[in-house]
Image (cartoon, rainbow, N blue to C red):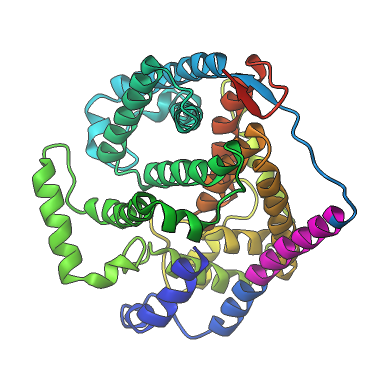
């Protein structure tokens, strides 16, 4: 993601961005030095945890799993949370009416963000049901529900042009297969091993990557009246004529992730406005209903807003819906102390990855957070926290209701 968002666009598209007056030369060295520091700190945190694990292992200090579930209960409760998600999101679609079918981000959000976000429950259900399917513990009825939930979300991904849905699908299926080896008495598989042993996963991953790019560019042709054939043919023709769009993220304009990130860094470098993480409290405050807090702020009006610095100091005006990306969002919170945050992020994810090989609850949390960190890198901290809570909470309830005591699933 760091290569895709920052390094590759700079190497291949910098002249194009300059020609379109989207970037300047000022602060570019500082920008990439900052990216390098944060990325290096993340890798260092990962390696420090690996070293501490090997040290504990040498002292014969072993971590034991302590979970045990009933497959039947996991399946039953997973279907229930999936149905809850479908019902509430269907209500959002019904209330939105024609607005929903207009494309990306369209719909009647006046019903409350809580109802809209409950669609994540369906992904929670798919994650649990698919893990049962891999272990051959899913009943015929469960397979039917898994397929129906998948089709429902595919429909939403197309109508709403949701590249995030493809990210969630890809990570759920990929990591479920990676950790499956532990369940059958093998070690957790590495990416390379998994791809060599299962070509379907390799080609499936490549297909998901293409769909991510295709979904973004198809927004240029999608409308409530356009048919599927016209959207597909128009998008393919665009990508054939402009292959640079395959690596340009949201396109070559002022909404491109690299362009927004660079100009947000530029704006902060021209002034100052570090809030030491205060803004990251907002996702939790956002759970307070506006009916109880009439003057509740928005993400943009709560503490330092990068868009204001972009508009005031940099060479562009921010695009509607654009984000400064997580690395630069962190820069607005901690400035040049940000690498410390990324060190702890690398350490924590490495720790959770190790535990994910042993317990299904840690595995589910790891997958949820991994999806969340994709949002963090491409957007800000807000979607990471919101998504992780909405997707992991129902999973945790399912496991608690299934008498979670050890990892192995009892049939």
The residue sitting at 34% across, 53% down in the picture is 212
**Dominant secondary structure, magenta:** helix
Check if residue 52 falls in the magenta segment: yes
Q: Position of residue 60 (x, y in %)?
A: 88, 50
Does 353 appear above or below 312?
A: above
Residue sitting nearer the eye, 236 or 282? 236
Residue sitting nearer the eye, 210 or 265? 210
The residue sitting at 29% across, 44% down in the picture is 161
Q: Position of residue 17 (x, y in %)?
A: 36, 77
Does 320 appear above or below 36?
A: above
Which region of the structure is painted magenta? 38-57
Left or right: 160 as drawn, with respect to 23: left
Quarter placement of the C terminus: top right
The residue sitting at 41% across, 74% down in the picture is 9
Query: How many marks overall?
Result: 0
Q: Is residue 378 visible?
A: no
Residue farthest along the right direction in this orientation:
59
Left or right: 56 as drawn, with respect to 74: right
Does 336 appear above or below 30?
A: above
């Amino acid at each position: 993601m760091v290569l895709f968002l920052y390094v590759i666009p700079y190497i291949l598209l910098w002249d194009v961005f300059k020609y379109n007056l989207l970037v300047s030369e000022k602060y570019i060295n500082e920008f990439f030095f900052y990216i390098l520091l944060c990325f290096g700190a993340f890798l260092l945190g990962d390696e420090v945890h690996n070293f501490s694990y090997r040290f504990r292992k040498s002292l014969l200090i072993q971590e034991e799993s302590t979970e045990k579930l009933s497959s039947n209960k996991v399946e039953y409760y997973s279907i229930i949370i999936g149905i809850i998600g479908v019902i509430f999101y269907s209500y959002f679609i019904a209330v939105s009416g024609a607005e929903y079918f207009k494309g990306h981000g369209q719909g009647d959000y006046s019903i409350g963000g809580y109802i809209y976000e409950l669609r994540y429950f369906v992904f929670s259900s798919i994650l649990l049901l698919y893990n049962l399917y891999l272990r051959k513990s899913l009943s015929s009825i469960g397979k039917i529900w898994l397929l129906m939930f998948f089709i429902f979300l595919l429909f939403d991904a197309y109508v709403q042009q949701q590249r995030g849905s493809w990210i969630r699908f890809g990570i759920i299926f990929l990591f479920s297969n990676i950790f499956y080896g532990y369940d059958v008495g093998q070690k957790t598989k590495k990416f390379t091993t998994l791809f060599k042993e299962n070509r379907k996963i390799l080609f499936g991953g490549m297909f998901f990557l293409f769909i991510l790019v295709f979904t973004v560019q198809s927004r240029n042709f999608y409308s409530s009246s356009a048919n599927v054939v016209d959207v597909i043919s128009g998008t393919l023709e665009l990508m054939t004529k402009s292959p640079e769009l395959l690596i340009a993220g949201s396109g070559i304009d002022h909404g491109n992730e690299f362009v927004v990130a660079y100009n947000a860094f530029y704006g902060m470098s021209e002034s100052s406005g570090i809030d030491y993480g205060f803004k990251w409290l907002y996702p939790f405050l956002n759970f307070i209903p506006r009916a109880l807090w009439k003057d509740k702020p928005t993400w943009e009006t709560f503490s330092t807003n990068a868009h204001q610095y972009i508009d005031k100091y940099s060479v562009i005006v921010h695009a509607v819906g654009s984000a400064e990306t997580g690395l630069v969002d962190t820069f607005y919170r901690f400035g040049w102390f940000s690498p410390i945050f990324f060190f702890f992020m690398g350490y924590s994810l490495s720790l959770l990855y190790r535990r994910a090989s042993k317990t299904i609850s840690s595995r589910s949390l790891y997958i949820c957070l991994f999806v969340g960190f994709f949002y963090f890198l491409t957007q800000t901290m807000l979607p990471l926290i919101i998504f992780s809570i909405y997707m992991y909470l129902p999973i945790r309830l399912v496991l608690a209701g299934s008498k979670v005591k050890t990892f192995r699933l009892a049939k």
